[in-house]
Image (cartoon, grey):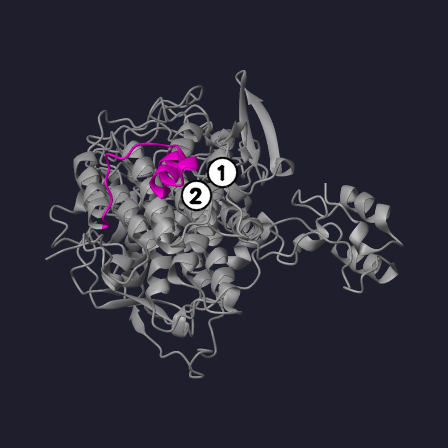
């Protein structure tokens, strides 16, 4: 029997229970229902990051409306150009019951709207109805008059506000999220045919024409040339992204909004004999070479325990430093591993497995295939697994008093939902603007041009692929790849994964690794999918995962998983779907949330989806997004320090406060040392306007400060 389930489904066996008496909070129950609906929908990471965020707002605002300290995110606020009026509610006699009722109505109204035309709409609607009924609520109550004191009406009102907000937030929900202005410059590549003869621009994204397109959720999609998904997503109203993070560019008369602009990716140098020194060529060459590490018969064994893998040091500062960070020929990154498990005080036990089993399991596990909740939802299932762990103490940021499951869930969901939504807005804004090519297009087109290493050899072209002995060579006479009439003589050949043509039955066949014509290179993916239908730069997986890892680290106050270890079992000859395997039982292990995130990033390289140039900017931007989203969420919780120029707490604004302010000057939300107390105008950065406000009360009593 073969299966491919997301790891939390296996670990925690998450499911939406109709029984309302189980131990999970009502917020968790609605989050589980949402994740199930995502699994039954089209694979749209941007859309579902937004659904996760908006549903988190539906839950949080219904909770915060009855709290004396917490501030709602949407109720009574202007978000973008949308205002959701709110005059407050009276405190009910049973706050817990009122919260649960309002949260259920807000979630039910939003989710039945959002998944009303989903391919799984019948199943999802039945699931929402079942949960709503099991909780004891009546879906015929549709009033939005929250001034009546009805929690149901408040929930309906929050749901209505979110629906209206979503119809004008830039996502084009009314148009089923279709693109409005984007058009690809390259004609489609047909992967089943050799080469890439029609490519116009080797630095821009290229659509793929498949025999049949099955998305990563297992849905057969109409048409066999999927369009670029969400290239204009940068205009969607974000959570914590700031206007100062934004650059607006013009192309073909249309605007592209880019937050946290990383600058352009490496472009193909067609003007000189750069060979492997060209960053573009080196990066895509690495993808092909790492494909040679997918052969379970090669005899290479790796210790994949946290003792060896994880604990990545600082990311490379420049693209030239990538060559020290990634191991071109052997695979992997600059992980130093962990000496001991800090929760047990013991070293992590080694786990030796075939390298190819590890790399293939990794590539498929993080690929978020059928029955998956997409990458942003994957991290919600990770959070839910953590929340269920018996060793977790629910203390916000790991300190202070224990809080209820409900409070923990709504705060965690808002921070994580905001983070993955901002990650989608940022990553897809960058994808849309830079419109960067994927490995299957780049490797094939370089091979079509020839080799770029030696002008004295046949087939030389500055746009060709670099030669690398044992991995990238030229077909010579007598080579089995030369063809019956030597029609392939002097073409480029690659030592890499052989591709799907060697797999008749994925339950029993292994394609393995060997020499293939470079014009027939494939990523390690299903032939009905091949590559996600959007540009590569920057990696969405890297951005989502690092942002989420930062949120979980801050929420729990601990960079480590509960007990210092989280595991996923991939059974021998059962787990893999693309081909047979693994050849032995493999246990993926992570010590920290960041370790899991970093492993996600590498999985996309072994899967043939991204070169390193897509990965590192995604990790770095995701790190900033995750920290900023959590810090911004804290403002609504009432747990962050309010702006106050009396930094030393002596009641006066004096010289010692100035010294402290000077040390903090220049930090912005998303920096690990950012402190909102110093952000006197609460705009997300500690800069000149904050100094102006500080100067106004310098030498005076702190009580004279008035926040703008």
Q: Is residue 214 visible?
A: yes
Task: Determine the secondary structure under disc 2.
Answer: helix
Query: Disc 1 marks which residue?
Result: 75
Q: Residue 243 carries which label?
A: none
Q: Is residue 634 above or below residue 226?
A: below
Residue 527 drawn above or below residue 297: above
Q: Which of 443 and 666 is in front in this view?
A: 666
Horizontally, residue 661 falls left or right of residue 243, namely right
Label pair 1/2, CB-CB below 8 angstroms: no
Could you tell me which residue is drawn at 31 percent across and 73 percent down?
352
Asked if residue 320 lies in the magenta stretch, the reply is no
In the current view of this chain or complex, which residue is farthest to the right?
699
**Residue 219: image location, x then y, percent:** 21, 36
Which quarter of the rendered picture does the N terminus lie within? Answer: bottom left
State which region is magenta: 135-159
Asked where in the image residue 119 lies, by quadrant, the reply is top left
Graded by Cα atoms within 10 Å as few (under 14), some (14 to 19) or many (20 or more), the crowding at tag 2 reads many
Q: Which of marks 1 and 2 is in front?
A: 1
Q: Mark 2 points at which residue?
A: 57
Answer few, some or many: residues within 10 Å of disc 1's Cα (few below 14, many 20 plus, some between 14 and 19). many
Using the image as rendered, state which of residue 680 and residue 650 is in the foreground. Answer: 650
Residue visible at 32% across and 54% down in the picture: 28
Which badge, 1 or 2, is on the more N-terminal residue?
Answer: 2
Q: Residue 140 colored magenta?
A: yes
Position of residue 48 measured from the top left corner of the image (x, y, whole percent)? 36, 40
**In the displayed image of the protein, which residue is found farthest to the top?**
253
Q: Residue furthest bottom?
A: 346
Looking at the rendered image, the quarter that the C terminus falls into is top right
Asked if 414 appears above or below 399 in the picture, the reply is above
> Helix, strand or loop at disc 1?
loop
């Amino acid at each position: 029997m073969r299966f491919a389930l997301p790891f939390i489904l296996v670990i925690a066996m998450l499911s939406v229970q109709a029984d309302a008496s189980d131990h999970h909070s009502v917020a968790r129950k609605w989050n589980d229902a949402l994740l199930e609906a995502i699994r039954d929908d089209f694979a749209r990471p941007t859309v579902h990051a937004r659904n996760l965020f908006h549903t988190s707002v539906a839950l949080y605002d219904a909770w915060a409306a009855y709290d004396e300290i917490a501030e709602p995110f949407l109720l009574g606020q202007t978000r973008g150009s949308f205002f959701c009026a709110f005059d407050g509610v009276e405190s009910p006699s049973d706050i817990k019951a009122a919260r649960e009722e309002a949260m259920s109505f807000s979630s039910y109204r939003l989710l039945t709207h959002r998944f009303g035309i989903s391919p799984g709409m019948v199943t999802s609607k039945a699931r929402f109805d079942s949960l709503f009924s099991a909780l004891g609520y009546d879906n015929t109550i549709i009033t939005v008059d929250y001034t009546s004191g009805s929690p149901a009406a408040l929930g309906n009102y929050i749901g209505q506000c979110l629906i209206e907000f979503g119809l004008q937030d830039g996502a084009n929900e009314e148009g089923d999220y279709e693109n409005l202005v984007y058009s690809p410059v390259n004609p489609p590549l047909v992967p089943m045919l050799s080469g890439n003869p029609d490519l116009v621009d080797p630095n821009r994204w290229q659509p793929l024409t498949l025999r049949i397109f099955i998305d990563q959720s297992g849905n057969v999609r109409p048409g066999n040339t999927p369009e670029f998904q969400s290239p204009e997503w940068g205009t969607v109203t974000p959570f914590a992204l700031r206007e100062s993070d934004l650059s607006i560019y013009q192309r073909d008369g249309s605007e592209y909004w880019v937050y946290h602009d990383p600058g352009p990716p490496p472009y193909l140098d067609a003007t000189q004999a750069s060979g492997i020194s060209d960053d573009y060529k080196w990066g895509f060459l690495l993808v092909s070479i790492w494909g040679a590490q997918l052969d379970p018969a090669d005899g290479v064994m790796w210790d994949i325990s946290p003792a060896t893998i994880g604990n990545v040091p600082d990311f490379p500062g420049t693209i030239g430093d990538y060559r020290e960070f990634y191991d071109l020929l052997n695979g992997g990154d600059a992980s130093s591993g962990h000496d001991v498990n800090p929760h047990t005080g013991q070293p992590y036990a080694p786990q030796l497995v075939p390298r190819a089993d590890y790399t293939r399991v990794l590539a498929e596990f993080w690929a978020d295939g059928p029955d998956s909740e997409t990458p942003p939802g994957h991290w919600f299932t990770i959070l839910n697994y953590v929340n269920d762990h018996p060793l977790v103490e629910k203390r916000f940021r790991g300190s202070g008093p224990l809080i209820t499951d409900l409070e923990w869930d709504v705060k965690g969901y808002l921070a994580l939902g905001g983070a993955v939504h901002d990650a989608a807005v940022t990553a897809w804004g960058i994808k849309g603007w830079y419109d960067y090519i994927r490995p299957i297009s780049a490797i094939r087109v370089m091979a079509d041009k020839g080799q770029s290493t030696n002008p004295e050899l046949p087939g030389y072209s500055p746009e060709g692929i670099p030669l690398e002995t044992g991995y990238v060579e030229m077909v010579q006479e007598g080579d089995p790849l030369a063809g019956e009439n030597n029609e392939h003589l002097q073409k480029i050949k690659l030592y890499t994964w052989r591709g799907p043509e060697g797999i008749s039955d994925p339950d029993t066949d292994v394609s393995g690794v060997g020499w293939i014509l470079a014009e027939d290179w494939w990523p390690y993916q299903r032939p009905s999918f091949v590559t996600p239908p959007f540009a590569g730069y920057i990696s969405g997986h890297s951005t989502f995962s690092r942002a989420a890892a930062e949120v979980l680290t801050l929420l729990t106050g601990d960079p480590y998983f509960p007990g210092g270890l989280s595991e996923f079992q991939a059974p021998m000859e059962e787990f893999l779907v693309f081909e047979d395997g693994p050849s032995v039982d493999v246990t993926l292990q992570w010590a920290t949330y960041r370790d899991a995130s970093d492993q996600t990033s590498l999985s996309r390289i072994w899967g043939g989806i991204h070169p390193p140039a897509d990965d590192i900017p995604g990790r770095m931007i995701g790190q900033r997004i995750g920290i900023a989203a959590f810090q911004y969420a804290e403002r609504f919780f009432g747990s962050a320090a309010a702006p106050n120029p009396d930094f030393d707490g002596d009641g006066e604004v004096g010289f010692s406060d100035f010294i402290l302010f000077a040390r903090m000057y220049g930090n912005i939300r998303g920096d690990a040392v950012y402190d909102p107390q110093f952000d006197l105008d609460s705009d997300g950065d500690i800069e000149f306007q904050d100094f102006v406000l500080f100067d106004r009360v310098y030498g005076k009593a702190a009580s004279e400060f008035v926040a703008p």
